[in-house]
Image (cartoon, rainbow, N blue to C red):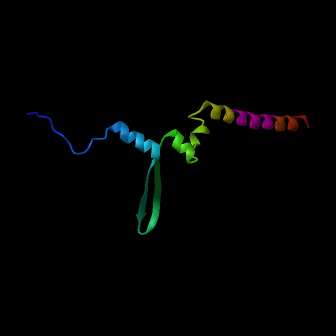
Amino acid sequence: MSNQITHGTQATNLADILERVLDKGIVIAGDIKVQIADIDLLTIKIRLLIASVDKAMEMGINWWQSDSFLTTSAKDKEMEEENARLQKRIEALEEKISC
């Protein structure tokens, strides 16, 4: 006689669950509100989306592509814009000096 325990349902491992969540996406939302005498002192809205990069882009979410802390291309673009602003300020100052 075998001492093995058999289950009626097949167990799902963590990798399968993670794959499903990333494929479909999951949203967790909540609000925190601090009030005293019906006066709102603080309101915090928390929204969390867990999904794969492909799924997020499919939904139109791609904020990380323009975040200078996450991509070098965004940082380069930010530096180019700052450089252009500084060049304009220098030109304006040079015009004031030459007049």
- Where residue 91 appears, x then y in whole percent? 83, 35
Q: Main secondary structure of the magenta part?
A: helix
Q: Where, by quadrant of the figure, is residue 62 drawn? A: top right
- 30 or 20: which is nearer to us? 20
Residue furthest to the right: 99
**Where residue 88 sits: x, y (%)?**
80, 37
Q: Quadrant of residue 73?
A: top right
> Residue 7, can we see it?
yes
Q: Residue at x 31, y 41 (%)?
A: 12
- Segment colored magenta: 79-90
Position of 27 compared to 80: left or right? left
Number of numbered markers: 0
Quadrant in which residue 94 is drawn: top right
Q: Please, is residue 90 above or below residue 36 in the view? A: above
Q: Residue at x 80, y 34 (%)?
A: 90
Q: Nearer the viewer, residue 42 or 94?
A: 42
Q: Is residue 71 left or right of residue 18?
A: right
Quarter of the picture containing the C terminus is top right
Q: Quadrant of the N terminus?
A: top left
Give the answer, above or below, for where 98 lies relative to 35: above
Tell me the residue at 42%/44% (across/down).
21
State the residue at coordinates (59%, 33%): 71
The residue sitting at the bottom extreme is 38
Q: Residue 36 appears at what percent x and percent y?
A: 41, 65
